[in-house]
Amino acid sequence: MSNGEPLSRGLLEAKIRALGPWFHNMEISGVKTAPDHFLGDYPNFKWQGFRDILPDDLEGQSVLDVGCNAGFFSLEMKKRNARRVLGVDSDPRYLEQARFAAKQSGLDIEFRQLSVYEVGALKEKFDLVIFMGVLYHLRHPLLALDLLYEHVVGDMMLFQCLQRGDERIPLLAEDYGFEEWAVFDQTEFPKLFFVEERYASDPTNWFIPNKAAVEAMLRSSGFSIIANPEREVYLCQRGLPHFMVQTPPEIVCASIDDQPSAYPHTS
Ligand SMILES: C[S@@+](CC[C@H](N)C(=O)[O-])C[C@H]1O[C@@H](n2cnc3c(N)ncnc32)[C@H](O)[C@@H]1O
């Protein structure tokens, strides 16, 4: 694929600055997008810790990256030879960054503005869905998991969620009598901490689960946990949801067909 004339170092730096601030620190033709990131070389240092749970070669596979941000994981999947990669995010500023990063890297990736609540509009199932770092930003986390299960996860899901609280997994009975109170006082009981205002200065951090709650929510929505290479990261496979889960309402984004394709890249 032709990448056009490479930008001079000065122009490249200026363009990266103009597209900022960046949450993903990526190296584009030798220029880092977020060299002073508060988490360090994020997300690359995290990725190095779990990259081996995915196949090195994704030839023939389709990948949907939900909440793709500047596209770090989308680019990694395309570098692994995935046939089709679609990155979606609700924030158009991040999508501009993602389109620029993909174009500069010569990678054919489509990016669309879409909320996780609108994935039904895609009318497509993907071999791998990436859903990293989004759940705790949602006011309706179980709805999002149910919609992903219902509409887009064909086989596997790579998932990450911020966790706080106890990381032990309790042994729980399937049922407790109405008079039982003590079980809820166990710190390891599945819990979602609700943040009314801000956590880490971010007013979009709504529900922060402990480890038991993350795993229970995944299972409840029909995702079997295959691997848990580090505390917050899970590789899941589409299984069967809890018998009481109702099919989520179809939430369709009316304007999806009007959006220009991100390829050929326009930014
Ligand atoms: C913490 S970042 C995670 C980015 C990337 N997935 C990662 O793991 O590095 C959260 C991303 O989710 C996006 N996001 C938040 N709410 C969303 C929604 N309802 N639908 C799609 N993306 C959303 C944000 O715009 C942001 O890019």
Image (cartoon, rainbow, N blue to C red):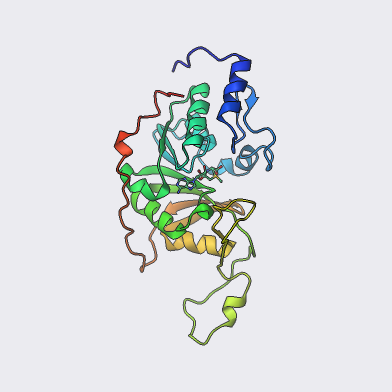
Residue 183, compared with residue 87, is above or below; it is below
Give whichever of 80, 15 is nearer the camera. Answer: 15
Query: Measuring 47% from the left and 29% from the top, which residue is drawn there?
Result: 99
Residue 29 in view (yes/no): no
Query: Measuring 31% from the left and 40% from the top, which residue is drawn there?
Result: 255
Query: Measuring 61% from the left and 40% from the top, which residue is drawn there?
Result: 43
Q: Residue 222 location, x and y as percent?
A: 41, 59
Residue 99, compared with residue 10, is above or below; it is below
Residue 136 in view (yes/no): yes
Query: Measuring 68% from the left and 43% from the top, which residue is drawn there?
Result: 39
Give whichever of 14, 181 is nearer the camera. Answer: 14
Q: Residue furthest front?
A: 197
Give whichever of 58, 135 is nearer the camera. Answer: 135
Q: Residue 117 location, x and y as percent?
A: 39, 50
Give whichever of 74, 118 is nearer the camera. Answer: 118
- In the rendered image, the quadrant that contains the N terminus is top left
Q: Residue 213 location, x and y as percent?
A: 54, 64
Q: Residue 194 location, x and y as percent?
A: 56, 63
Residue 31 in which image quadrant: top right
